[in-house]
Image (cartoon, rainbow, N blue to C red):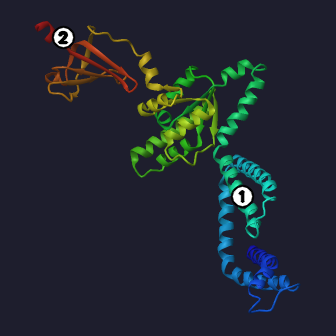
Amino acid sequence: MVRRFVQLFLTLMGGGLGFRFGSDLFELLDPFLNVGGVVGPYIGAVVGALLFFLLSTWLADYIVQSIRWGEEALLKLPITDVLFGAMGLIIGLIVAFLFFIPLSYIPLPIIGDFIPLIISCLLGYMGFQVGFRKRDELMNVFSIGRFSRNKKEEPAKQKNDDLKILDTSVIIDGRIADICKTGFIEGTLVIPQFVLEELQHIADSSDVLKRNRGRRGLDILNRIQKELKVNVLIDERDFDDIHEVDSKLVRLAKVTQGKVVTNDFNLNKVCELQGVLVLNINDLANAVKPVVLPGEEMNVQLIKDGKEHGQGVAYLDDGTMIVVEGGRDYIGMHIDVLVTSVLQTSAGRMIFAKPKMLEKAL
């Protein structure tokens, strides 16, 4: 059925073009073909219809395939993308119509008939692209207006409605669930759709370790959504012009004015460079760890060699690494050490120490 409509449309278009330009063509060919005058447009319409009908038998299948491909692409798009794209298209066509008025006074034979069509296609396409690609910023503009209207009526609600955008690493880590349980996280937890897709991709991996990490992340999300009293929002927005998940998180945080929750050191730095507020779980963990000062004594068990010659490595119960200078000879033993320095960063904390018995010997 669609193929027949395409053929009918092409045939009518050929007839219309033949009726419009047939007489002019016959006038050029008048020395050879004595056809023109009143019957020229009608003969041109018949010839144009026949030519385009024959052409449609070859082009119809390609046009139908293109129509079905476009239909499937539109059905896959979120409704917000389609609406904003249509709004941009309408605005582009209105601007094109405004251009027609001054152009109608310019005498441009033959070419002047095609200029409105060219301008309409160009501005319509540009309007659709602007509306489609800038949809998130436009939605943000509308939300700012709604926010300003409701700010005086519900200040407490707006203050508490603070968005926390979770990335993949912090979901797999799992500590975010315990933090939410204690009530230290306020506002709404935002889980982007592209983060869910990445978790599902990890959970379906053929690698056992990656598969377990992905399933753990999905279990953590189920726990947060079902067991904990926090607001959870699944954000379905995606950014087709961006491929990396971290870059999409930064863009989403800018659009929604939210904060990124992560334990990824590199993402933390990228957010700081782009002016996006970030909450690093490692920073929180380091802040609540017991403070260790140089000169304090500790009893640790050395379990392996360090990177440098003669070093031994031990760990506290919370996973903090202790590098003991000259501790290689004591691997497997519990010894007293003196803290010499502490290195604390967003990536974690390291404690440097040396055996107490060596200090006494000195």
Q: Position of residue 266 (x, y in %)?
A: 42, 33
Residue situated furthest right in the rendering: 38
Measured along the vertical axis of the image, is residue 15 above or below residue 190?
Answer: below
Quadrant the N terminus occupies: bottom right
Work out whether mark 1 precedes mark 2 in sequence or the reverse, and give the earlier one.
1
Instruction: Describe the element under mark 2 as helix, strand or loop.
Output: helix
The residue identified by callout 1 is 119
Q: Give the residue at x 74% y 58%.
A: 120
The amino acid on which the numbered mark 2 sits, given as a three-letter code, is Lys
Residue depth check, mark 1 versus mark 2: number of the one nearer the observer: 1
Let me know if residue 134 appears in the view.
yes
Residue 77 located left or right of residue 287: right
The residue identified by callout 2 is 356
Residue 337 located left or right of residue 169: left
Q: Position of residue 203 (x, y in %)?
A: 48, 46
Q: Position of residue 272 (x, y in %)?
A: 48, 28
Residue 295's image quarter? Answer: top left
Neighbor class of circle 1 (other Cα within 10 Å; few <14, some 14-19, many 20+) is: some
